[in-house]
Amino acid sequence: MSSEEVKKIKKKNINNVAYIFVLPFVVVFLIFSVYPVIRTLQLSFTNYKGYGDPIFVGLANYKRVLSDKFFWRAMANTLRIWIPNIIVQLGIAFLLTIIFSDMKYRVKGLSIFRALFYLPNLIAATSVAFLFKTFLDWRFGTFNQILMKIGLVSSPIDWLGSSSTAPYVVAIISAWMWFGNSFIILMAGVQGISKDYFDAARIDGAGRWKVFSKITLPLLRPILLYVAITSMIGGIQMFDLPFLISDGTTGSPSGILQTAIMYMYKFGFEAYQVGYASSVAYVIFMFILVLSIMQFKLYRREDEV
Amino acid sequence: MAYKIKKTLLYVFLILLAITCLLPFLIMIVNSTRSGREIMTSFTLIPGSSLKVNWETVFGYFNLFRGFFNSLIVAIPTTILSGYFSALTGYSLAVYKFRGRGILFGIIIIFMMIPGQLNLLGFYNLVSSLKLVDSYIPLIIPAIAAPGTVFFLRQYVISVLPPSLLEAARIDGAKEIRIFHQVVLPIMSPGIATMSIFAFIGNWNSYLVPLILLNTPEKFTLPVMVASLNSSTDIAANQGAIYLSVAISVIPILIVFAFFSRYIISSISYGSVKE
């Protein structure tokens, strides 16, 4: 055997170690990630109740989801919270990005402000829900007291108990939790833009707004898109906050806070219609899949440009 | 002059926004020292004298330290397992050439896009057929397979590990697992630390999965325990106690953040731009 061959065999042996190294991951992954996904799909074609034997029912569950007005209501509710949320969240994050990347004012303290703005995102949604529920309680809450003290309102407002305010309050709480995260990502995007662009623009005598609209904004576009779509994928799965604020899956007041995942949870863990809930999960997943593909396609297009 | 005024206005805006981020926490801490009646009738940022009473009320409902301890029992092994095995898997995917590597990596990327809450029903079904409901095992063991962390650490290895280092270690005759432990892990540690902080915080805050898996109140993790206040207390009388229990659950996260905010922020930036 030549030394060349010995080397080859040795190299091969070295690579074989990888099978042992990835084994724990693969085993646990197959059991706890892959299997549940397949199992959910399987159950979605049955009338499984959480006990007993599942009976195959074909596409009946899917037909039921798509024709159930309460499912669509839950989807609409989710959007009703998500849309104002993303407007406020991205709006503030974008404004902050403009402020901190402005060449004229050169605002300082980026790292401190960034940390402070990110703080609300670290706290468990359960704690946030509780904090605001108590804070906004219409009879005893501190918020109404402040408003009445400064004379903005004359009688307390039932922020979370009225269906005309509750979705927007949840949207704003959610924006409060997430704007710091969006800001960090956008700011990283600005810092990733090569200084050469800005220098060249300055030499050419371009004004601040021109630099912003011709350089910063176009280069930030893919990142804005990334933030919006990731937020939408996350937003469709909104659960903790509305669930805790509205005392369970009913989505009170008047079901307006029942999000899509709360609807799924209600059938899967409260109403013993696991088969049906599984099909709800897959319908929601299809929406997310479409969004993910859109994101991927848009990315690709940005890359080609 | 106009420049100075405008600049001042910008700072005023930023500081006001920072206050909106901090004020609810401040109110939470202050109100946890005041009685329900005081909170109801007046608003102030000066601490009251009812901390002890509130404390007793909270612990009358449940042992919050128990929840604290339970959360640690789940969050610490989860963080360690996901850090170690994700590093090992990410490193293997980056360094070794083996059959199935491409498929494995592809599946990992696909699963990063599958939202966790959507395999919840199949997961619960599996756990109940394994007779593991109301146990910490299904909360901890799945951490061994964290696709997002593996993906991040694979990219990380590629960018920080010089291949010549591995060659040198191999010529010295070191075994592969020893190379991983003694050469690779130390180099990867900043990346592992970053992901571990996220894993810990995510786990500490996790609500939905422990909610469906745990039945025995003594086993509740902190978020589940705090949320159970929802149904069990009278907000009017116990506002102070509610604020206190939320405060106790939030403090560890604030401490973690105070020490690691730099890592956390840099990794959010990294994740979004470098991919």
Image (spheres, grey):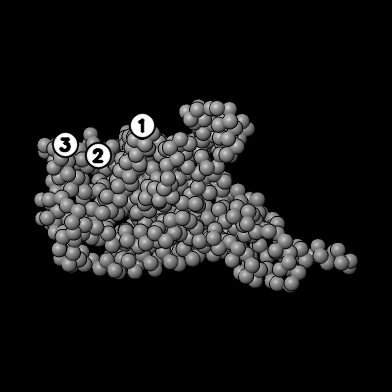
Discs 3/1, front: 1
Q: Residues within 10 Å of mark 3 (few under 14, many from 20)?
A: few
Above or below: residue A255 compared with residue B246: above
Counting residues from the start of the chain, the first of labels 3 and 2 encountered is 3
**In the rendered structure, the residue with mark 3 lies on which chain?**
A
Q: Is residue A279 left or right of residue B64?
A: right
Circle 1 sits on which residue? Answer: B2
Q: Amino acid at mark 1?
A: Ala
Q: Dot 3: what SS?
A: loop
**In the rendered structure, the residue with mark 2 lies on which chain?**
A
Q: Dot 1: what SS?
A: helix
Circle 2 sits on which residue? Answer: A166
Above or below: residue B16 compared with residue A204: below
Q: Dot 2: what SS?
A: helix
**Do pointers 3 and 1 mark residues of a single chain?**
no
- Confirm whether residue B254 shows in the render: yes
CA gap, disc 1 and disc 2:
41 Å
Say which quadrant the C terminus of chain A sits in. top right
Circle 3 sits on which residue? Answer: A152
